[in-house]
Each structure stands twice: as C-alpha cells, then as structure tokens.
Image (cartoon, rainbow, N blue to C red):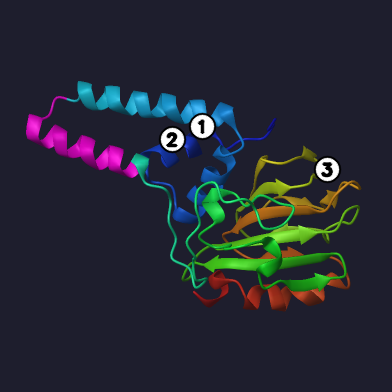
Amino acid sequence: MTNYHPSIEMLTDYAAGSLPLAHSLCVSTHLEHCHECQQQIRKLEMLGSHLFDQTPVEERQLSSLKDSFFDTLMKQPKVETHVKQSHIEKNTPHWDEYKIPSSLRQFITKSYDDLTWMRLSPSFKIATLYNEDGGAQIALTRVKAGAHMPTHTHTGDEITLVLEGAFSDESGVYRQGDFINRDASHKHKPIVTKDAECICLTVLDAPIEFTGWFTRLLNPIIRRYHPHSHA
C-alpha cells in the first residue's frame, strides 16, 4: 500500500496532458502501484468529460476539443531515448528478481543490471535514463541495504519514486510505489532499510548538492552530467 502520492494539482495536470513528460513518467509509474490515484485519474477524466459537455461552444469546435482532450488522456507518456528499445510483450516475465514497470520499458530492455551505472560511493550508484535538453534528468538511484545516500540539498525540484526496497529520512519511511516531491529548501539524508537494497526513479530539475566534507567533491561530477548545467 502506497502512503505518499502526487498532489491533486499534479494529477490534474497529468490527466489533462499538461504535465512535463519527465514528471508524467513518474506519475505513470506510480499509478502502476496505486489504486487510489488510479481512481482519482478516472474521476478527473469524468469531470473533464462533464466540463466539455457543459461548455457552450459550437458543436464542431466542441467535438474537436473533446477529441484532442481524450487523445491526450489516453496517450502513454513517451520520451525519446538513446537506449534502443526491443520488442517486449505486455506479459513478458522480468529478467532478474525485479519486475520492470511497464512505464520504464522504453528505457530498460531487460533488467536494471544491464544499465550503465556510475558508482559514486561503495554503496551508492546512479544510472541516467534520459536528459531533456537544458531541462530535467530522469535517472535511477541504487543504494545497498542498510546504507545511506550522502546528505544533500536540492538546487531545484526533485521527484523520487520508490521502485524496490524502502528508505527513510527525517520526514518518514518510504516504500514501493511511494511518490516523494522535494523542493530546493529541503535537506535530507536518506537511509535504506536493512532488509533489501533500494532502487528509486528520480526526476531532477537541477543537480543535487552533496554537503559532506568528502562527498561535496562529487558535486562537479553530478553537475557535469545534468542537462540543466548546460542550458
């Protein structure tokens, strides 16, 4: 059961097709785990349909607006990527001990292990899935059981979605499917539970900043690989 969800404003933008693609990917992946938000999306779709029916515009224009709106709703968020996609059937079994969310199969053709991981510490590594030109970065973080990610701040908004395992910080405990949204004012030190490693999907509008005496040496590396730094 998921305990942390996108805001109603974010779900509304997602349903209307106006949420940025990187953020839509996180919401779409969250929906695979969360029946509560699936119901919210259905309600928003019904509300959108009702509002269209009540809008006093010419019939031809109304029909065009409806088609455009529902086409947007039904489209799965797609992001072009440098990772070559292979044909994957809907019911294809996962290739390792983890099941890859269907929303991420455009990036991960077989398993998490096949990605190119950049190790930033003995227990923490990151794999970039996609960089928007001058915009957000979509990535996976992978932290060993019982380990912690270095203390860091945010220079922009960060969305984290737990895919496997669990972690905690000063604000709570987050498990599979939980959706966490942080802004630039937040500083935390995530700690992974001792029973399993933790894999998270992240969207970073700007690079994070490590604050420890040693880990801050990694900041130039983090900035170098983030598209926001080259805008």
In what quadrant of the picture does the N terminus appear? top right
CA separation, marks 1 and 2?
A: 6 Å
- Residue span colored magenta: 56-72
Closer to the camera in the image, 54 or 109: 109
As drawn, the label of residue 8 is 1
Q: Position of residue 156 (x, y in %)?
A: 61, 58
SS state under label 3: loop
Q: Position of residue 206 (x, y in %)?
A: 60, 63
Q: Earlier in the sequence, mark 3 or mark 2?
A: 2
Q: Main secondary structure of the magenta part?
A: helix
Q: Residue at x 68, y 62 (%)?
A: 112
As drawn, the label of residue 170 is 3
Q: Residue at x 44, y 60 (%)?
A: 79
As drawn, the label of residue 61 is none
- Amino acid on which the number 2 mark rests in the picture: Thr
Q: Position of residue 43 (x, y in %)?
A: 42, 24
Contact, mark 3 vs mark 2 (Cβ under 8 Å): no
Contact, mark 1 vs mark 2 (Cβ under 8 Å): yes
Q: Residue at x 52, y 71 (%)?
A: 83
**Mark 3 crowd level (few <14, some 14–19, many ≥20, 10 Å Cα):** few
CA separation, marks 3 and 2?
A: 29 Å
Using residue 225 as the reference point, say whether residue 172 is left or right of it: right
Q: Position of residue 197 (x, y in %)?
A: 82, 53
Write down the residue under mark 2: 12
